[in-house]
DNA sequence: GTTCGTGCAAACGGTTTGCAACAAT
DNA sequence: ATTGTTGCAAACCGTTTGCACGAAC
């Protein structure tokens, strides 16, 4: 169950302690964008773990590139398992962040900024608005995934 | 000098007290992206003003749509005078935010997300990387403006 | 017994809030 | 007098840090 998670930790030079594995298991398998406190609330149900350990572990995972830290909404950092490039859509009412597939939006001419002195290492489109209900669960799911 | 600023405040139903005019004058004329504390440091040199008043005023201006609050970097909110649409480039070393002209990058197919249940009200491209020095000041300036 | 990870509580930094003083109408 | 604005300090909240305990090699 956590064999693959342990493997990933070790590959990245992280000692797979029980606590770290628990945090990593949760954050690597979520498709949401939980804050550190939310991770703590969830993982803390299964074993005794302090906020500090959760924060430290998440930062460690982020440093090693296993997950990504996002600061899109105000006042808090959220984490997501690092899966390829994608864009983000933020529901203005609920604050919920949705992943938008890379191919769903096309961005062009970013290379053109090179000449103006901008070495763009990464970029994404950040969208804000409202999320509507959609009839077909297939569509919704496909858009939500990745 | 502050006649136009006062006018803009009144147009938006904001009573133009001396303190509010001072804050508004500063934030509306900057082309940077100062945090509330930075605004306080600057405005505080000219008149006695408390942090609370600066924070309250900036939030008020943001609520009324005169300026925009951004949370791109972690741990702090920065403000910018609301001038049309543009993108943002964040220097990963310094944290400095640069405005990138709307036309410099083209984004297409955002409308296509409508069908997937996303009512996109606004969007922008957020880029991260490193800012290089550029020989021609003309180029640099043009890219930085707006 | 040295090294590393953890829990706890305190510290921290940016932001907000409560409240009494103070305009201005 | 009522209404709204300000300064100050305290509260707040997410996050980090210091430290002593404990497990593992």
Image (tube, coloured by chain):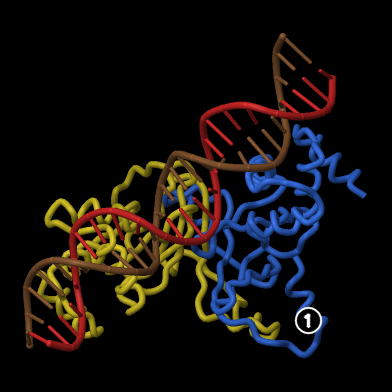
Chain colours: A yellow, B blue, C red, D brown
Viewer-closest of B7 and A133: B7
Above or below, comparing residue B63 to residue B115 in the picture: above
Of the 4 image quadrants, the one containing the C terminus of chain B is bottom right
User: Which residue is at the front of the view, D3 or A103?
Assistant: D3
Q: Indicate the position of residue A37 as horizontal and vertical percent values.
A: 31, 54
Viewer-side residue, C13 vs A65: C13
Provide the chain ID for the residue under circle 1.
Answer: B
Q: Position of residue A117 (x, y in %)?
A: 67, 84
Q: Is residue D11 above or below residue A101?
A: above
Front position in the image: B89 or B60: B60
Count of numbered badges drawn on the protein: 1
Within the image, what quadrant is residue A66 found in? bottom left
Q: Position of residue B140 (x, y in %)?
A: 76, 80
Tell me if D16 is positioned left or right of A137 in this view: right
Q: Which residue is mark 1?
A: B139
- The residue that appears at 64% across and 41% down in the rendered structure is B63
- Within 10 Å of disc 1 (Cα), the crowding (few <14, some 14-19, many 20+) is few
Q: Residue at x 64, y 48 (%)?
A: B51
The reply, left or right, for residue D17 in relation to residue B41 is left
**Residue depicted at x 33% and y 71%:** A67
- Per the image, label 1 sits on a secondary structure element best described as helix
Which residue is pictured at 43% across the width and 55% down the height? A76
Where residue B53 sits: x, y (%)?
Answer: 67, 43
């Amino acid at each position: 169950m956590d064999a693959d998670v342990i493997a990933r930790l070790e590959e990245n030079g992280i000692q797979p302690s029980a606590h770290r594995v628990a945090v990593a298991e949760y954050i690597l398998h979520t498709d949401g964008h939980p804050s550190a406190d939310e991770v703590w609330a969830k993982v803390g149900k299964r074993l005794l773990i302090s906020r500090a350990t959760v924060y430290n572990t998440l930062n460690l995972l982020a440093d090693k590139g296993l997950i990504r830290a996002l600061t899109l909404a105000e006042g808090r950092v959220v984490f997501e398992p690092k899966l390829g490039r994608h864009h983000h859509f933020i529901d203005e009412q609920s604050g919920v962040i949705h992943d938008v597939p890379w191919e769903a939006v096309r961005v062009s001419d970013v290379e053109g900024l090179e000449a103006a002195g901008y070495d763009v290492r990464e970029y994404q489109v950040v969208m804000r608005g409202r999320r509507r209900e959609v009839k077909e669960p297939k569509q919704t799911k496909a858009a939500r995934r990745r």
